[in-house]
């Protein structure tokens, strides 16, 4: 089976696409934790919320498709910022309090979607979906691949490189790095720590939105999938190292390819890898063996 | 436990300096705290069974005992007022979740090992109990206990890696584990071992759908479980659990094997969660993989937050409050909205409770009831003329 070129190409491409999506998700997640020390359990919810918002606007036909995308990319980060100001910041001292609040926020978002939509998926049925940005297929090594996948990889690469350049070179990026190294010292240097942390949360929601807008037309989502994506982001970030962006990217591709390789090359009966086993195993093993992750920094206390 | 005034009284001037040669790390005030802990445990170690009449009298007079007794009597009288099966169902569900929430409180509130995946124990208890009854034909009391023991074993499997995880990582790990079980038990390709997405169906009911009889059975079981958990809470074991929560390093330093006691906490909590899960399965007559869903893990958190974290009885109160108010919300919605929205009423209730939970956590530290309980306590004392 390995030598069937179609499977190989599929694995390569789908793995890269999911890897790009996970990279976008994980980079945001890792950024929020690295800078603010916040573990955002609502990250998966942000992802699916973006998808659903695009779908609602597109389905209602009020606004053209591109505006719907822009709206989603604006609304979800705003929600993230509001939830930071009112929910996360006040409970920042209690680590567990933050967890419970983001946990309930994730629930809130998921339940609101279900309330509004019913527990139906988008993307599975043709008319309950929004179209991908580019349609059509490209020939690659003899098989057709939806061009959207290529677009996902290109945009993810661009966005993440832009983010890394932004963090390395710009003044705000310097503030972000400063806050991630030492919050109090940064505050003493005149950096508005709260604003920086809020900025990272907004950025992470924005990245999740981009990932969602690109990927949802190809892979359908249910409202309850928020936990699935959260689990995936968590395992990628823990594998790659909390607080390390490069590690998240590497981890994303490792996890994505592991998932697809086992999906294609292991017997259907043993498709355990397709379930959360891989992610759980990664989380548990990494947390025990090397909580820092592959490329992580020293553990924040 | 010590309250704030007592702690302030401890004289910090009497701290000994560390002797370089012998390196005694424990100073005087710490010894005093340990001594007080021992006195406390000696006082409360017989909380469970007020066997002698003098114990019983003083227990009733105490705030918790009095309110507890009144509530118990009121609850037992409920079957006289209600005759609709729906109301029985509400109270039975509330009691089952009460046990579940109390078990979560014991692990997370008292011992500080916050677990976001408690539904794992709940579901495993339910599945094993259902499987035992349906496929092995056991009687339900045996099945419940056996199911819970299997739950304890699974609890150990979860606990051993969790020992090394602290705080948020433990919560994440437990969440991940329950999500894993959700997927595992839902996969149709593993139907032979894990029953697939339809779960186990047609499990014979506890009392063959005589809800009134079931009400009393579940009530008695709940009382037994909660009393045992309260006994643990007030005993030396409970004090050690609380010490682990407050400062694990000091506890370890005073010679207590925190690993062993954390395992105990997981085991006891998993046992009672398993009992709750078994009762749940028996009540519904079937079990589906949804029992592992994240929302079931969410329930005990919010119930305990409402009732007051680290008080076992608060969990039961929170469970009642949550279930009853959810049902009230559903009833209100039934009156207000057309029936096509019927399916989402439960979601509306959960939605509202998620908001409540957010507000509760945002504005209080230890749960909603604590200020209220403090005021009621002083009121009670005044009433009794103290």
Image (spheres, coloured by chain):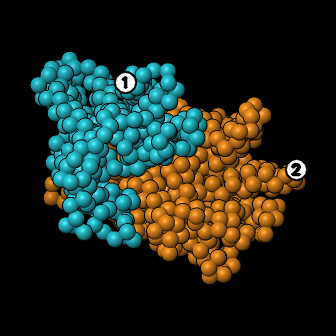
Chain colours: A cyan, B orange
Q: Is residue A18 left or right of residue A107?
A: left
Secondary structure beneath disc 1? Answer: helix
Q: Residue at x 50, y 75 (%)?
A: B192
Q: Residue at x 43, y 30 (%)?
A: A54
Q: In which chain is the residue bearing label 1? A: A
Q: Examine the rendered structure and indicate whether residue B291 appears above or below residue B336.
A: below
Q: Looking at the rendered structure, which numbered label has been put on residue B13?
A: none
Which of the 4 quarters of the picture holds residue B199? bottom right
Of residues B272 and B382, which is closer to you in this image?
B272
Q: Examine the rendered structure and indicate whether residue B379 appears above or below residue B90.
A: above
Which of the 4 quarters of the picture holds residue B321? top right
Whether discs 2 and 1 lie on one chain: the answer is no
Q: CA distance from mark 2 to mark 1?
A: 60 Å
Q: What is the x, y in percent for residue B112?
A: 43, 51
Badge 2: residue crowd in 10 Å (few <14, some 14–19, many ≥20):
few
Query: Which quadrant, please, contains the N terminus of chain A?
Result: bottom left
Q: What is the x, y in percent for residue A33?
A: 28, 38
> Label 2 belongs to which residue?
B81
Q: Is residue A38 left or right of residue B188?
A: left
Q: Looking at the rendered structure, which numbered label has been put on residue A66?
A: 1
Query: Which quadrant, please, contains the C terminus of chain A?
Result: top left
Q: For the image shown, how many numbered marks are present on the structure?
A: 2
Which of the 4 quarters of the picture holds residue B346? top right
Q: Is residue B14 left or right of residue A46?
A: left
Q: In which chain is the residue bearing label 2? A: B
Res B318 visible:
yes
Q: Residue at x 78, y 54 (%)?
A: B88
Of residues B340 and A276, which is closer to you in this image?
B340
Q: What is the x, y in percent for residue B248?
A: 35, 54
Q: What is the x, y in percent for residue A137?
A: 28, 43
Marks 2 and 1 close (CB-CB < 8 Å) = no
């Amino acid at each position: 089976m390995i030598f069937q070129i179609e499977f190989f190409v599929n694995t390569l491409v789908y793995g890269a696409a999911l890897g790009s999506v996970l990279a976008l998700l994980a980079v945001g997640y890792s950024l929020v934790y690295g800078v603010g020390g916040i573990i955002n359990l609502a990250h998966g919810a942000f992802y699916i919320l973006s998808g659903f918002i695009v779908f609602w606007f597109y389905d209602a036909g009020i606004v053209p498709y591109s505006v719907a995308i822009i709206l989603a990319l604006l609304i979800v980060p705003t929600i993230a910022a509001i939830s930071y100001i009112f929910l996360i910041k006040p409970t920042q001292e209690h680590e567990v309090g933050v967890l419970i609040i983001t946990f309930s926020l994730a629930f809130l978002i998921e339940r609101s979607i279900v309330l509004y939509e019913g527990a139906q998926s988008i993307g599975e049925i043709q008319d309950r979906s929004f179209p991908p940005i580019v349609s059509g297929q490209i020939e690659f090594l003899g098989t057709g691949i939806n061009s959207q996948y290529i677009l996902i990889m290109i945009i993810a690469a661009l966005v993440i490189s832009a983010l890394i350049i932004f963090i390395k070179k710009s003044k705000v990026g310097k503030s972000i790095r400063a806050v991630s190294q030492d919050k109090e010292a940064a505050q003493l240097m005149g950096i508005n720590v709260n604003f920086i942390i809020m900025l990272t949360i907004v950025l992470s929601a924005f990245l999740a939105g981009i990932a969602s807008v690109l990927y949802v037309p190809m892979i359908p989502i249910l409202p309850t999938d928020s936990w699935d994506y959260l689990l995936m982001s968590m395992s990628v970030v823990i594998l790659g190292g909390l607080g390390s962006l490069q590690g998240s990217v590497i981890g994303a591709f490792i996890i994505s390819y592991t998932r697809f390789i086992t999906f294609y090359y292991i017997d259907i009966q043993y498709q355990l890898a397709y379930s959360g086993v891989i992610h759980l195993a990664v989380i548990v093993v990494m947390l025990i063996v090397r909580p820092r992750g592959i490329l992580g920094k020293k553990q924040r206390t | 436990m010590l309250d704030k005034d007592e702690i302030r009284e401890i004289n910090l001037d009497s701290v000994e300096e560390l002797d370089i040669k012998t390196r005694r790390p424990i100073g005087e005030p710490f010894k005093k705290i340990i001594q007080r802990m021992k006195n406390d445990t000696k006082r409360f170690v017989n909380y469970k069974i007020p066997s002698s009449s003098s114990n019983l009298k003083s227990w009733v007079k105490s705030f918790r005992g009095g309110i507890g007794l009144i509530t118990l009597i009121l609850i037992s009288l409920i079957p006289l007022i209600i005759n609709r099966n729906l109301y029985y169902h509400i109270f039975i569900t509330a009691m089952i979740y009460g046990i579940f929430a109390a078990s979560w409180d014991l692990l997370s509130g008292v011992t500080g090992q916050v677990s976001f995946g408690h539904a794992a124990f709940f579901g495993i208890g339910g599945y094993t109990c259902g499987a035992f009854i349906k496929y092995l034909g056991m009687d339900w009391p045996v099945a419940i206990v056996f199911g819970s023991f299997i739950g304890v074993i699974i609890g150990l499997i979860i606990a051993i890696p969790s020992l090394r995880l602290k705080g948020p990582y433990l919560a994440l790990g437990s969440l991940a584990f329950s999500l894993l079980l959700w997927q595992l038990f839902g996969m149709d390709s593993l139907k032979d071992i894990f029953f697939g997405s339809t779960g186990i169906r047609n499990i014979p009911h506890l009392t063959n759908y005589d809800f009134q009889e079931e009400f009393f059975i579940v009530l008695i079981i709940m009382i037994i479980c909660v009393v045992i958990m309260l006994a643990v809470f007030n005993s030396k074991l409970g004090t050690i659990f609380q010490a682990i929560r407050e400062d694990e390093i000091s506890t370890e330093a005073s010679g207590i094997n925190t690993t062993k006691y954390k395992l105990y906490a997981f085991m006891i909590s998993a046992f009672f969660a398993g009992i709750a899960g078994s009762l749940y399965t028996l009540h519904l007559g079937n079990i589906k993989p949804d029992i592992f869903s994240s929302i079931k893990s969410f329930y005990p958190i919010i119930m305990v937050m409402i009732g007051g974290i680290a008080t076992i009885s608060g969990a039961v109160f929170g469970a009642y409050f949550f279930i009853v108010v959810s049902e009230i919300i559903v009833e209100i919605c039934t009156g207000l909205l057309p029936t096509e929205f019927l399916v989402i009423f439960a979601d509306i209730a959960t939605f509202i409770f998620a908001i409540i939970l957010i507000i509760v956590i945002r504005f209080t530290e230890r749960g909603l009831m604590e200020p209220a309980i403090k005021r009621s306590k002083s009121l009670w004392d005044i009433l009794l003329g103290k």
